[in-house]
Image (cartoon, coloured by chain):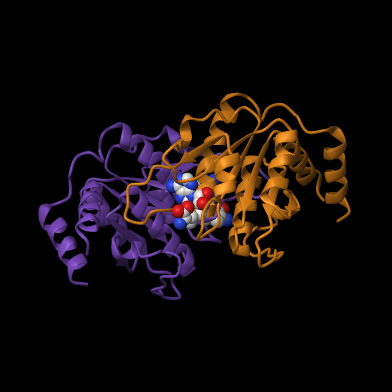
Chain colours: A orange, B purple
Amino acid sequence: MTPEREQKLLSVLQRRQPDLTLIAEQVHKPRNISALIRNCDAAGVPEVQVVKPKEGYHNYRGTALGSDRWVDTALHETLDDAVDKVRAQGMKIYAAHFSDEAVPYREVDYTQPCAIIMGAEKEGISPRAAELADAHIIIPMQGVVSSLNVSTAAGIILAEVIDQRLRAGLYDQSRMPIEWIARKMFEARYP
Amino acid sequence: MTPEREQKLLSVLQRRQPDLTLIAEQVHKPRNISALIRNCDAAGVPEVQVVKPKEGYHNYRGTALGSDRWVDTALHETLDDAVDKVRAQGMKIYAAHFSDEAVPYREVDYTQPCAIIMGAEKEGISPRAAELADAHIIIPMQGVVSSLNVSTAAGIILAEVIDQRLRAGLYDQSRMPIEWIARKMFEARYP
Ligand SMILES: C[S@@+](CC[C@H](N)C(=O)[O-])C[C@H]1O[C@@H](n2cnc3c(N)ncnc32)[C@H](O)[C@@H]1O
Ligand SMILES: C[S@@+](CC[C@H](N)C(=O)[O-])C[C@H]1O[C@@H](n2cnc3c(N)ncnc32)[C@H](O)[C@@H]1O
């Protein structure tokens, strides 16, 4: 690794957000999981929570462009497992979900510790996830088709997270444990 | 078609934005074109401009979820053709492009007539497109990977367009030619 590359990597790792994650609930297509991971990288999410789809989880790396090396994946058997984990970290939970209670996604304060649940391609968010979430968020749409692709929806919500956290200076402080940063740098040097 | 469906369709067609379009420059993967069209539908873009990829254009409909029925596609042999067309309609042109002059995408006024150029998966925006554009816009990223998927990037920019145009009341007025709306309704009744 060149010194420049090492420097760039260090600065990215220091921008990782310990209090931000995404929960993929039964997202079936490996390509969509991969795209979610790429979006998580862009927003500084250190670890994505994947609730195993019933038909199994395939480790597909087609369109992640290597981002999966820098975003960890925590696999969960059930949604409750994923929710318990992020709650224990003090995160609020927002489900990207079409419901009557849903608020426009830009009205939420994402500078607070939070996890965003994204639903399955066909079924969307499960009733259980809708119930466990602190609030439902929605991206206003003006067209005929009633939903966005799951990774596009995640990208749009995370773009708002980035905007709010940039303005709050949350990417300017190194907030990940120093051991975590050291381990990642080590892994990058000796892959 | 049920009366409810007909009513819903009419209201969507009335929200279409005559002064908003997207130019896909050499976007190669049919799946990405399809995803762009789905995003265009959500933002009320009536017609997307596709500059033919060199290897040809495939009419793929995998993930558009029928949105291609409601978003027209204008095919262009060259980028210049597409640009001439939208300029003649009084649109400003923004290229989603990583360059030193690029401004953060939320700093642009999208309530004015405008076209957004999206670049190819590998090569990005061509030098010609960069030159013809009135400005370059960029979505700030905090990760290792240096770009977003083209349809995710378009979705994020269009989400900002929707936000601005909702606040300006541009989706509350019916601005498409009445003949266009009538033709679309006819096509929907007798497909
Ligand atoms: C293709 S959509 C699922 C559509 C499903 N038929 C439904 O009604 O929920 C997949 C996931 O993307 C997210 N999503 C898509 N469009 C969205 C929007 N406009 N607002 C919020 N979330 C959205 C949601 O998490 C959704 O569960
Ligand atoms: C995968 S990117 C192309 C990357 C290419 N290597 C480059 O350097 O331009 C495909 C297209 O998506 C858009 N795009 C992706 N990420 C973007 C970002 N952060 N800001 C603005 N546009 C972006 C641009 O139009 C780009 O041409």
Which of the 4 image quarters holds residue B183?
bottom left
At 82% from the left and 38% from the top, the residue drawn is: A181
Which of the 4 image quarters holds residue A114?
top right
In the depicted view, which residue is nearer to us: B117 or A163? A163
At 32% from the left and 47% from the top, the residue drawn is: A142
A136 sits left or right of A76 in the view: left
Q: In this view, does B109 lie above or below B120?
A: above
Q: Can residue B120 be seen in this view?
A: yes
At 68% from the left and 27% from the top, the residue drawn is: A172
Q: Can residue B152 be seen in this view?
A: no
Q: Is residue B190 above or below residue A128?
A: below
Where residue B85 sits in the image (x, y, percent)?
25, 56
Which of the 4 image quarters holds residue B112?
top left
In the depicted view, which residue is nearer to us: B131 or B122? B122
Where residue B77 sits in the image (x, y, percent)?
33, 69
Where residue A11 sits in the image (x, y, percent)?
74, 36
